[in-house]
Amino acid sequence: MEREAVTIRFPADLLAKAKKLKFVSESLNDLVVEALENEVRRRRGWAAHQRIIARSETVKAKTGIQRTSGDLIRSFREGEKRRD
């Protein structure tokens, strides 16, 4: 992975906590990179979740509330309505 140097200013107390929590074999840079990767993944997940909710609301507005598919799946498993 190509790396780029940046300057980041941390609050002094947060930097002190991070230095205490990092592993001996881990650099502060590694800790920050891992934390940022986790945050990017979390935010992408949250954005995907919000898109799913919006799409669900759009479908619900067009079609109304749909029945749960649980009963239909259960009947298929029990052999009812099968087209074998």
Image: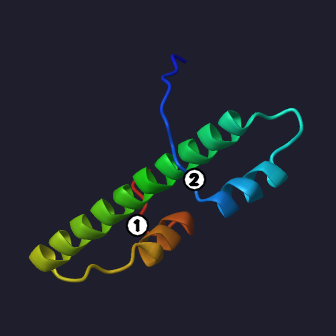
Q: Looking at the image, do the residues carrying marks 2 and 1 touch, with CB atoms under 8 Å apart?
A: no
> How many numbered circles does the render carry?
2
Residue at 65% across, 58% down: 12
55 left or right, relative to 46 = left
67 left or right, relative to 3 = left
In the depicted structure, whether residue 22 falls above or below residue 62: above
Task: Say few, some or many: other residues with alpha carbon within 10 Å of mark 2 (under 14 / 14 to 19 / 20 or more).
Answer: few
Provide the residue designation for mark 1. Answer: 81
Provide the residue designation for mark 2. Answer: 10
Residue type (three-letter) at the residue carrying disc 1 = Lys
In the depicted structure, whether residue 69 falls above or below residue 36: below
* SS of the residue under disc 1: loop
Q: Position of residue 52 (x, y in %)?
A: 31, 62
Mark on residue 58? none
Residue reaching furthest to the front: 12
* SS of the residue under disc 2: loop
Tell me where residue 13 sits by quadrant.
bottom right
Residue at 45% across, 78% down: 71
In the depicted structure, whether residue 53 falls above or below residue 5: below
Q: Position of residue 62 (x, y in %)?
A: 10, 74
C-alpha distance separating marks 2 and 1: 63 Å
